[in-house]
Image: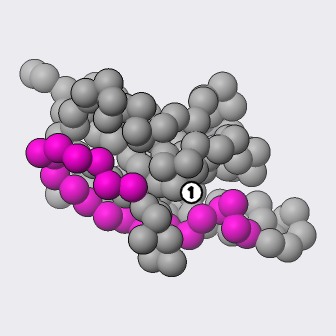
Amino acid sequence: MDKKRVLFVCVHNSARSQMAEAFLKQMAGDRFEVESAGLEPGKLNPVAVEVMKEAGIDISQNKTKSVFDFYKQGRSYDYVITVCDESQSGKCPIFPGRGKRLHWGFEDPSGFQGAEEETLERTRGVRDKIKFRIIEWLQE
């Protein structure tokens, strides 16, 4: 059986798309080849790294990647899933090709303000929403 190819896309590829990639690889890596990328790749979000470690997944060595680099390399995907929140929908990259496009909007942890514990708690919430959305998608 050929694995379906999935690309998770967001603006910076620093948190949401990285978490989604990691969860799908963990849950169904035998059925999917999974990557993530961003429009403006930044630095990996350390809070996202921490909350994923709490969930038993180490993304600390991941690199942020550019959706344009993937396009220039001629990559194609069966599913392109954008994970930008609604306020960033205009900036959320579109990956050309024939793959099925899905949009799952999640808040951007890079914009969270406040005390460290509050930021951690809000990022945990995003992590859990991503995890449960992937579980739902796999059951569809």
Determine if residue 59 is in view.
Answer: yes
Instruction: Give percent across and percent down for residue 2.
Output: 13, 23
Q: Residue at the location (48% across, 49% down)?
A: 39
Q: Is residue 29 magenta?
A: no
Q: Is residue 100 magenta?
A: yes
Instruction: Give percent across and percent down for residue 66.
Output: 48, 38
Q: Which residue is mark 1?
A: 127
Q: Residue at the location (39% across, 55% down)?
A: 93
Above or below for 125 versus 23:
below
Would residue 89 be found to the left or right of residue 16 on screen?
A: left
Would residue 134 be found to the left or right of residue 46 on screen?
A: left
Q: Nearer the viewer, residue 54 or 61?
A: 61
The stretch of residues the image draws in magenta is 93-112
**Residue type at numbered disc 1:** Arg
Determine if residue 33 is in view.
Answer: no
Residue 53 placement: quadrant: top right
Q: Residue furthest right?
A: 115
Q: Secondary structure at mark 1?
A: helix
Quarter of the image with the C terminus is: bottom left
Q: Nearer the viewer, residue 87 or 140?
A: 87
Q: How is the image coloured?
A: one colour
